[in-house]
Image (cartoon, rainbow, N blue to C red):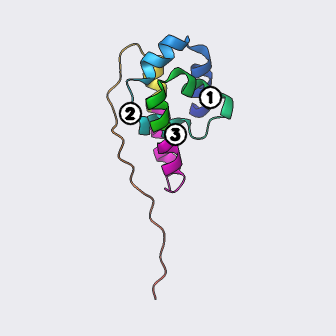
């Protein structure tokens, strides 16, 4: 199964309190990178489970990510990290939230 589909299914299956507790272990940037490409209904579930301040930070990160180029491999790393955190009762080791931008091929003048 595709990791993004599995993430969406996991978000829908967890009780709200458990979803909130497990999401709060993650950085806003990690959550944003993972849920950015989910369906609006699944994103709404995530935002409704988060406290207002954290939900605002995740929305800000999603807005910032629209201006960044995030390689699909890097995006899948975030999806898998969030998925692992949601599926386990203990928090997995954080991957950090530094995003390495994808470089453009520039033409020589």
Residue 42 lies, in percent from the top left, at: 63, 28
At 53% from the left and 21% from the top, the residue drawn is 49
First in sequence: mark 1 vs mark 3: 1
Alpha carbon separation for disc pair 1 and 3: 11 Å
Observer-nearest residue: 39 or 9? 39
Magenta span includes 74: yes
102 over 80 or under it: above or below: below
Element assignment for label 1? helix
Residue 20 lies, in percent from the top left, at: 47, 18
Closer to the observer: label 2 or label 3?
3
Specify the label residue 59 is tagged with: 3
Residue annotated with mark 1? 44
Observer-nearest residue: 35 or 16? 16
**59 sits left or right of 44 in the view:** left
Observer-nearest residue: 103 or 44? 44
Residue 60 lies, in percent from the top left, at: 48, 43
At 60% from the left and 24% from the top, the residue drawn is 45
Residue annotated with mark 2? 27
Dots 2, 3 in contact, CB < 8 A: no
4 over 12 or under it: above or below: below
Q: Main secondary structure of the magenta part?
A: helix
Specify the label residue 103 is tagged with: none
The magenta stretch is: 60-80
- Residue 1 shows in this picture: no
10 Å crowding of disc 3: few (<14), some (14-19), many (20+): some
């Amino acid at each position: 199964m595709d990791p993004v589909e599995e993430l969406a299914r996991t978000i829908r299956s967890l009780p709200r309190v458990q979803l909130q507790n497990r999401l709060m272990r993650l950085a806003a940037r990690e959550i944003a990178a993972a849920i950015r490409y989910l369906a609006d209904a699944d994103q709404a579930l995530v935002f409704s489970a988060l406290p207002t301040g954290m939900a605002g930070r995740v929305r800000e990160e999603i807005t910032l990510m629209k201006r960044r180029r995030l390689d699909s491999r890097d995006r899948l790393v975030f999806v898998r990290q969030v998925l692992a955190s949601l599926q386990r009762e203990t928090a997995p080791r954080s991957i950090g939230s530094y995003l390495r931008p994808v470089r453009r091929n520039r033409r020589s003048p």
